[in-house]
Amino acid sequence: MTYLREDLQQLWQDQDPLEKAFALEGEVFRDVPGRRTLRVVLDNKAYFLKLHYGVGWSEVIKNWLQFKWPVIGASNEYVVCKALVEEQIPAPVPAAFAASNGSIAAQRSFVLCDELAGYTSLEDITDRWPEHPPSAIERQRYLYAVAQFARRFHQAGFIHRDFYICHLLSNDVERASGKVSLAVLDLHRARRFARVPFRWLKRDLAALLFSSLDLGFSERDWLRFIAIYSGKPASVALREDAALWQAVRQRADKLYSEGLRKGLVKGLYTP
């Protein structure tokens, strides 16, 4: 399967998209076994390119034995990003995609997306909050925006599987005018369902909560998030969806405890 947007069709006319993509050079953002992410500039326009080199049968079989959905290439991210754009949920816009034929374990593939220019990750925005707390209004503005975005994302059937605040971006122009407008990225593990299963909803929401535990949000803020996300009073949501919210809190606390042991969190929260 190959997809080339019109501008890429003109740019790579009569060339093999796979060979062209794998020959590109740029600023490397991630380089892990089987996958490489880099920022490239083509015809004076910036893109993010994800190259997948094949995970090997051992990785595929390991995931199957653990009843996990193996991520074997770029097709997953291409399909999800395309669907998010169709749902008008801000995310990287695919410009090109291709995958080689043959074994799924050795398949080479890539997805090229427009750069989300003019956005800053929530992790970077909130990094200094513990030492320099924002105003109450600003804090509530972000809480409301994140809860609304998560609600819309999940109601459309999407799960992220790495739904941490570092993967949510705030539009810089909107933020300068006192508004918070969000986008999502790093979607290579994301999936879409007709209705999000409990297991995946719990994991996404727990990741979101875990990644905000050092930011000084109160219990009252957590109840506000629940009310905004669920679209009903927190007392009602906690009664009707008790199993979900208890599971979310328990998993977030577990993740934080693990983060403390590994030195990955600031230690400002007590599970």
Image: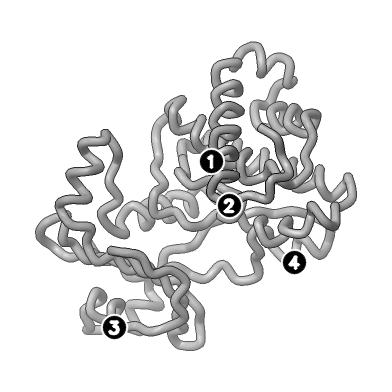
- SS of the residue under disc 4: helix
The Cα atoms of the two marked residues, 2 and 1, are separated by 8 Å
Please name whichever residue, 206 or 118, is drawn nearer the observer in this view of the structure: 206
Q: Residue furthest left?
A: 102
Which amino acid type corresponds to the residue marked 2 in the rendered image? Leu
- SS of the residue under disc 2: loop
Badge nearest the viewer, 1 or 3: 1
In the image, residue 26 sits, relative to residue 251, either above or below, namely below
Q: Which residue is mark 2?
A: 264
The residue at the point 43 percent across, 27 percent down is: 197
Q: Which residue is mark 3?
A: 23
Badge nearest the viewer, 4 or 3: 3
Number of the label disc, if any, that sits on residue 173 = 4
The residue at the point 44 percent across, 28 percent down is: 199
Which amino acid type corresponds to the residue marked 3 in the rendered image? Ala
Q: Residues within 10 Å of mark 3 (few under 14, many from 20)?
A: few
Rendered location of residue 19, percent (x, y): 23, 79
- SS of the residue under disc 1: helix
Left or right of residue 201, residue 151 in this image: right
The Cα atoms of the two marked residues, 1 and 3, are separated by 40 Å
Q: Tell me if label 1 and label 4 are in contact, CB under 8 Å.
A: no
Rendered location of residue 46, percent (x, y): 50, 79
The residue at the point 60 percent across, 33 percent down is: 253
Q: Which residue is mark 1?
A: 258
Which amino acid type corresponds to the residue marked 4 in the rendered image? Val
Upstream in sequence: badge 2 or badge 3: 3
Upstream in sequence: badge 1 or badge 3: 3
The Cα atoms of the two marked residues, 4 and 3, are separated by 34 Å
